[in-house]
Amino acid sequence: KAGVTQTPRYLIKTRGQQVTLSCSPISGHRSVSWYQQTPGQGLQFLFEYFSETQRNKGNFPGRFSGRQFSNSRSEMNVSTLELGDSALYLCASSLAGLTDTQYFGPGTRLTVL
Amino acid sequence: AQSVTQLDSQVPVFEEAPVELRCNYSSSVSVYLFWYVQYPNQGLQLLLKYLSGSTLVESINGFEAEFNKSQTSFHLRKPSVHISDTAEYFCAVSDFQGAQKLVFGQGTRLTINP
């Protein structure tokens, strides 16, 4: 079975721009969750989607949004980028949700200049 | 709100020595507990998890963790480490009532010296 894939792997943007990251879950997984990883804050939960509905949300501003498609693929969008948004963005998929084993992708490294 | 504290940011040990990585959590409801591992240049992967039942859980590569409800801890141990255990280890907690979040600790970087 193919693992979780994320595209692109690397991104460089400037302040004020917006960015869209993509995540393809393991086949059969209906839950996709997103995380931000930084040296200072560690791994922080952004949100979780299950069957095209946002089911859970972390403590991030509204500039961070996401969606999930009928094939379970998910996108995360960040608008009006700030320098502090530079991070590794990880997505994970699972069968049932956040109480289930999460299978993580390799991440998208976003650098905001 | 849940929180997870990993008491040591870095743990250096010699090969074949025992190791304990400490994790404490706080939550007002019952929780599920996880240890994830991130090997160099690899993605995060599950090491072991506690959902219910026996408070001692084991992984296939010799790690074990014990859920201690009274001390709200889920420490990770291995009696004898190998060079290949060098990685960053993350403790995580998820509640199973109400709004669910998966909260991670800050991580512990385990370095094995020959």
Image: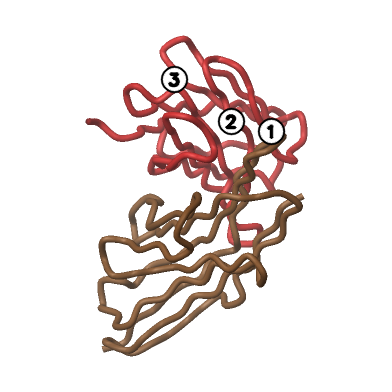
Whether pointer 1 and pointer 2 mark residues with C-beta atoms closer than 8 Å, the reply is: yes
The disc label shown at residue A57, or none? 1
In the foreground, B35 or A21: B35
Whether residue A15 is visible, yes or no, is no
**Chain depicted in brown:** B
In the rendering, what colour is chain A? Answer: red
**Residue pointed to by mark 2:** A48
Q: Residues within 10 Å of mark 1 (few under 14, many from 20)?
A: some
**Mark 3 or mark 1, earlier in chain:** 1
Query: At numbered mark 1, what does the secondary structure look like: helix, strand or loop?
Result: strand
Mark nearer the viewer, 2 or 3: 2
Rendered position, B91 above or below B94: below
Query: At numbered mark 3, what does the secondary structure look like: helix, strand or loop?
Result: loop
The kind of residue tagged 3 is: Arg
How far, Cα to Cα, is label 3 from label 1? Answer: 18 Å
The kind of residue tagged 2 is: Glu
Residue in the image at 37% along x and 50% along y? B43
The disc label shown at residue A73, or none? 3
Residue in the image at 47% along x and 81% along y? B11
Q: What subunit carries mark 1?
A: A
In the foreground, A73 or A8: A73
Mark nearer the viewer, 3 or 1: 1
The kind of residue tagged 1 is: Lys
Whether pointer 3 and pointer 1 mark residues with C-beta atoms closer than 8 Å, the reply is: no
Q: Does residue B81 appear to the left or right of B33 in the view shown? A: left
Whole-percent x, y for residue B87 in the image: 38, 67
**Mark 1 or mark 2, earlier in chain:** 2
In the image, farthest residue toward the front: B53
Rendered position, A80 above or below B33: above
Q: Residues within 10 Å of mark 3 (few under 14, many from 20)?
A: many
